[in-house]
Amino acid sequence: MADTTQSSALREEFNRWAEAGRGEGMEQDHLPITLPVLEKMRLAPTDNVLDVGCGAGWLSQRLAKLVPEGRVVGMDISDEMIRHARRSSMDFDNLLFVAGEVAQIPWQPHFFSHAISVESSYYWPDPAAGIKDIFRVLREGGSAWVLINYYRDNPHCHQWGDLLAVKTHLLFAEEWAEQFRAAGFTNVAHARVVDPSPSPEVYTGRWFRDAAHLRAFKAEGALLVHGTK
């Protein structure tokens, strides 16, 4: 019951984000740490890729260009985000968006060669269940890639929890890795992806104390966890 309540709260919160246009701004914030991950994934033109927590679809569109003979499925718990994603992706023949929860991905087993989630997994009501269902929809030899900026090993992001309207999971890198192993993944590893983008001289947002705090956060880097089925 708790997961159902949390899922509803999460859907409502991200529907509000979508209606406020925040989905479209995610690319600017997350592209600098995502590009190195796309290189590591070594996508082939015929690959099928799942984008978990796709938001307004910026990453799904980029993936679709990398796998012109394959398929990309973007999934998000927010039906409003999915509507935004569909509207902006009309020109793509190999890109599909579905509303759904990561613990119950609306897709058949053994289909995807890769799954990626950028800045989504710490919101999942039950991260372990989500990783298990990603394992289910991957084919043998497929790989999962989870990239997050909010994790316990980086002390410069802990304040986010109190600023967010929904419950989050602040886990250590090794806790994420253990959930991958428990789901059945092999060759599980984690690494840092440093954000090389320039920081403002003066920071006026709500997520960090000041510009120095933001720079320290970026220097620690995002957490990338990955494994193979």
Image (tube, grey):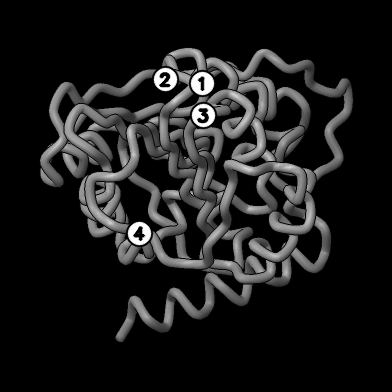
Q: Earlier in the sequence, mark 4 or mark 1?
A: 1
Horizontally, residue 139 falls left or right of residue 66, namely: left
Question: In the rendering, at what x and y percent does residue 140 appear?
Answer: 17, 33
- Vertical relation: 87 (above or below) 131: below
Q: Vertically, is 90 above or below 29?
A: below
Q: SS class of the residue under badge 2?
A: helix
Along the viewing direction, whichever of 114 and 186 lies nearer the viewer = 114
The three-letter code of the residue at mark 2 reads Met
Quadrant of the rendered structure where residue 152 is?
A: top left
In the foreground, 228 or 225: 228
- Distance of label 2 from label 1 (alpha carbons): 5 Å
Q: Secondary structure at mark 3?
A: loop
Q: CA distance from mark 3 to mark 2?
A: 17 Å
Neighbourhood count class around disc 1 (C-alpha, 10 Å): few under 14, some 14–19, many 20 upward: some
Q: CA distance from mark 4 to mark 3?
A: 19 Å
Residue 41, label in figure: 2
* Residue 164: x %, y % from top left: 60, 61
Q: Could you tell me which residue is drawn at 42 percent across and 49 percent down? A: 121
- The residue labelled by disc 3 is 69
Provide the residue designation for mark 4: 107
Residue that carries the numbered disc 1 in the rendered image: 38
Mark closest to the chain's N terminus, 3 or 2: 2
Query: Which numbered disc, 4 or 3, marks the residue closer to the eye?
Result: 3
Instruction: Say which residue appears at 57% left-offset and 56% top-offset.
Output: 97
